[in-house]
Amino acid sequence: MALDATYYDDMSLNPEVIDPSKNEDMVEVSEHVNDHVQHSPKPNISVASSVRELLECPVCLNAMYPPIHQCSNGHTLCSGCKPRVHNRCPTCRHELGNIRCLALEKVAASLELPCKYQSFGCLGIYPYYCKLKHESQCIFRPYNCPYAGSECTVVGDIPYLVTHLKDDHKVDMHNGSSFNHRYVKSNPHEVENATWMLTVFSCFGQFFCLHFEAFQLGTAPVYIAFLRFMGDDNEAKNYSYSLEVGGYGRKIIWQGVPRSIRDSHRKVRDSYDGLIIQRNMALFFSGGDRKELKLRVTGRIWKEQ
């Protein structure tokens, strides 16, 4: 829920992975499990769809990993779903017992499959038992939309998300590494974990998201501003930023490293990794009768040498 805030811009100051290799019940396929290195695509690789379908749990429809269970009639399901079906086969309703389908586990160990992010540029071929872990860390996996004002489910690469933020969320876009924003709120006592503003900056050939919002820190309402990098964490560490807010002879300065949008907006906010302003101090900076919030936040982004 967005608060009713007026925004002024003065540029003159220049969004549980199972690791099968750690499962104690893993059938002996260590030569495959330990192979985490990306392979080059192999010619004429084809995996029969029927084999891949056999490895799909009929309950959750996810790929199955050891221990794979089966009933006396040979129907299989994953270990995560077994407790959910109360020891009854979801296919034939016979009692499941504790039968392992070792044959299917060994078949899975012989498979090599492409990464599911192949369409995003990943050309690796991975052993079945390594594929899931790779995909959880694949550098080609899409990013979640960084917009915090709603539960947006859009995913994509950075160019796609930049266009999405501009066209669908109507986010302000600015070029340059310095900024000077003014945030005005007529009733600063209304603090309901609401996002006030998201601005995207383009500089150094990259994109950065500046967040400013009000939220509850315990029982105290506070304001926070922080920067997120539209890219991976290893690239974000190449940049730093500073934020400053003040007035009437006082100022608060924050300097930090932008967080990757791989970290959710809520995760960054709840770790207090940004410029935090207590409400009383924010009203002091606003001046006047302290009934209206008027904060000017300035800052800059730079690339570390």
Image: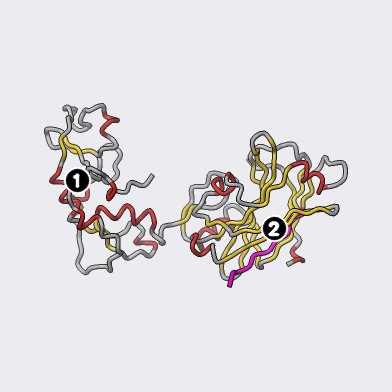
Q: Is residue 140 left or right of residue 199?
A: left
Q: Give the range drawn in magenta.
A: 296-305
Residue 31 lies in quadrant: bottom left
* Residue under the image location 16 percent in, 51 percent down: 107
Say which quadrant the N terminus sits in. top right
Of 19 and 47, nearer the camera is: 19
Determine the residue located farthest toward the right in the rendered image.
Answer: 288
* Residue under the image location 77 percent in, 48 percent down: 184
Locate residue 218, reporting x and y percent: 64, 35
* Residue under the image location 67 percent in, 51 percent down: 275
Of tags 2 and 1, which is closer to the observer?
A: 2
Above or below, comparing residue 236 to residue 73 in the picture: below
Dominant SS type (magenta): strand
Total numbered badges shown on the rendered structure: 2
Secondary structure type for disc 2: strand
Locate residue 68, reporting x and y percent: 21, 41
Locate residue 81, reporting x and y percent: 28, 35
Of the residues shown, which amino acid type is indicated by label 2? Leu
Q: Compute the Cα span from label 2 to label 1.
A: 55 Å
Location of mark 2 (residue)? 243
Q: Can residue 221 be seen in this view?
A: yes
Locate residue 94, reporting x and y percent: 16, 27
Of 79 and 163, nearer the camera is: 79
Q: Can residue 197 be seen in this view?
A: no
Q: Is residue 10 left or right of residue 134?
A: right
Location of mark 1 (residue)? 54
Of the residues shown, which amino acid type is indicated by label 1? Leu
* Residue under the image location 65 percent in, 42 percent down: 2
